[in-house]
Image (cartoon, rainbow, N blue to C red):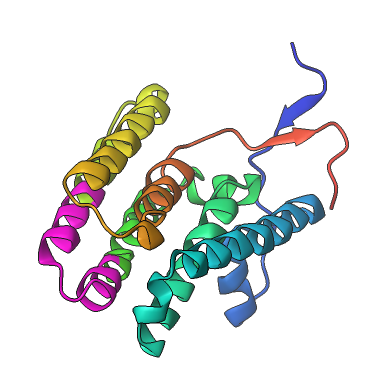
């Protein structure tokens, strides 16, 4: 038995109003170390993404509005991967509450807006890319969410790999946007939908 780790599903109380809703959206009870990792990871990966996109030269052909959409999508996906991987998010989105499944699926479905913005606006109305990825998202989410709980992690990994491969060979985009699909499906199918025990060290930081 591991003595250096413990599992805690206890969800701390949240304040009323907008502050409480925001805290629940991000995951109540996030520790200082989780916040540090999120902040450093977001800044570091965002800088790498910006440098990569700029060095590719593709950004010079985009309008200011397209640049804004790409920048917002990048920040959302990087931040979303990190946030949804935290113990705080796992405790909240996979809590023992009949409404939790509905909340997870609504969260995933809301990201169809991301696909529409990228496909129809940044990719100049590419319906094949938009509809293809929408089908991968909804089908993949259903496969993960309704799989037996002990199989959800490998099912999510299988669907993630399938989505990445489909995007590489049948729904390709310019190199400057090749990051979108892997981060998109990683955030939603693996980080958000897979239930994982909220592990804490023996001395949890506040």
Magenta span dominant secondary structure: helix
Q: What is the x, y in percent for residue 10?
A: 67, 45
Q: Residue at x 27, y 58 (%)?
A: 173
Q: Residue at x 51, y 45 (%)?
A: 95
Q: Quadrant of residue 204?
A: top right
Q: Is residue 83 magenta?
A: no
Q: Is residue 109 visible?
A: yes
Q: Quadrant of the N terminus?
A: top right
Which is nearer the eye, 145 or 128? 128
* Position of 203 relative to 134 (above/below): above
Considering every residue shown, the one lying at the far top of the view is 1
Which is nearer the eye, 18 or 129? 129
Residue 156 as seen in the image, left or right of residue 132:
right
Q: What is the x, y in percent for residue 130?
A: 18, 63
Q: What is the x, y in percent for residue 50?
A: 55, 68
Which is nearer the eye, 106 or 171? 171
Which is nearer the eye, 47 or 120? 47
Magenta stretch, residue numbers: 115-137
* Position of 199 relative to 134 (above/below): above
Q: Is residue 25 visible?
A: no
């Amino acid at each position: 038995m591991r003595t250096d780790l413990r599992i805690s599903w206890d969800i701390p109380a949240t304040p009323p109003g907008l502050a409480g809703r925001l805290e629940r959206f991000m995951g109540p009870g996030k520790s200082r170390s989780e916040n540090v990792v999120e902040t450093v990871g977001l800044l570091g990966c965002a800088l790498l993404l910006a440098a990569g996109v700029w060095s590719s030269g593709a950004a010079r052909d985009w309008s200011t509005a397209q640049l804004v959409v790409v920048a917002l999508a990048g920040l959302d996906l990087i931040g979303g991967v990190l946030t949804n991987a935290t113990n705080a998010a796992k405790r909240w989105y996979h809590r023992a509450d009949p409404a939790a499944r509905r909340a997870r699926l609504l969260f995933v479905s809301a990201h169809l807006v991301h696909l529409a913005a990228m496909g129809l606006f940044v990719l100049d109305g590419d319906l094949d890319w938009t509809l293809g990825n929408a089908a991968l998202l909804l089908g993949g989410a259903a496969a993960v969410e309704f799989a037996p709980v002990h199989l959800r992690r490998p099912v999510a990994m299988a669907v993630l790999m399938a989505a990445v491969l489909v995007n590489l060979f049948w729904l390709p985009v310019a190199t400057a946007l090749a990051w979108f699909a892997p981060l998109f499906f990683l955030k939603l199918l693996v980080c958000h939908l897979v239930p994982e025990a909220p592990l804490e060290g023996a001395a949890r930081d506040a």
